[in-house]
Image: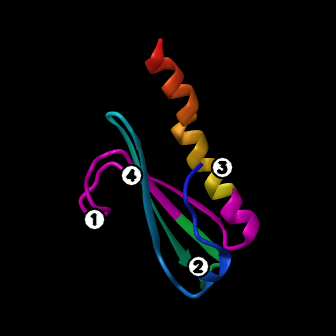
Amino acid sequence: MFDMQNLTFFTEGNTFTGSKSHGERLLRYLARPDKENGQLLAWVWEEDLCFERANPKEHKAFLLTEEGIQQLSAWLDSLWGESDEELSEKEEK
């Protein structure tokens, strides 16, 4: 599961960044509202660099709604793939 802010945070115009790592694996993300178009824009990248310097980045847009935030979280989970528990079990074997 990825940390994510609530709808009010984004409707007030705030940008949220985060990352998840396990061993050498890293996924960084940024979510920013586009209030004019009612969208929540999201980018992900795997480099240990800031957003401005990272390439390539994957981008996706969601509705600026509670459902859109849930879809963004599900997208991040799908990009990560395996849960932390599954990765830990593999390391123990």
Where's residue 79, x and y in %? 54, 41
Q: Looking at numbered disc 3 in the image, what kind of residue is underneath it?
A: Ala
Q: Are marks 2 and 4 in contact (CB under 8 Å)?
A: no
- Report the side of 69 relative to 59 (left or right): right
Crowdedness near tag 3: few (<14), some (14–19) or many (≥20) residues, C-alpha within 10 Å: some
Mark 1 vs mark 2: in front: 2
Where's residue 41, x and y in %? 54, 67
* Residue closer to the observer: 15 or 85: 85
Q: Label 4: which residue?
A: 57
Q: Give the range drawn in magenta.
A: 42-70
Q: Distance between the residues labelled 1 and 2?
A: 20 Å
Q: Looking at this rendering, what residue extends furthest in the bottom direction?
A: 12
Q: Looking at numbered disc 1 in the image, what kind of residue is underneath it?
A: Glu
Where's residue 81, x and y in %? 56, 34
Q: Do the residues labelled 3 and 2 touch (CB within 8 Å)?
A: no
Where's residue 56, x and y in %? 33, 48
* Residue closer to the observer: 75 or 87: 87
Q: Earlier in the sequence, mark 1 or mark 3?
A: 1
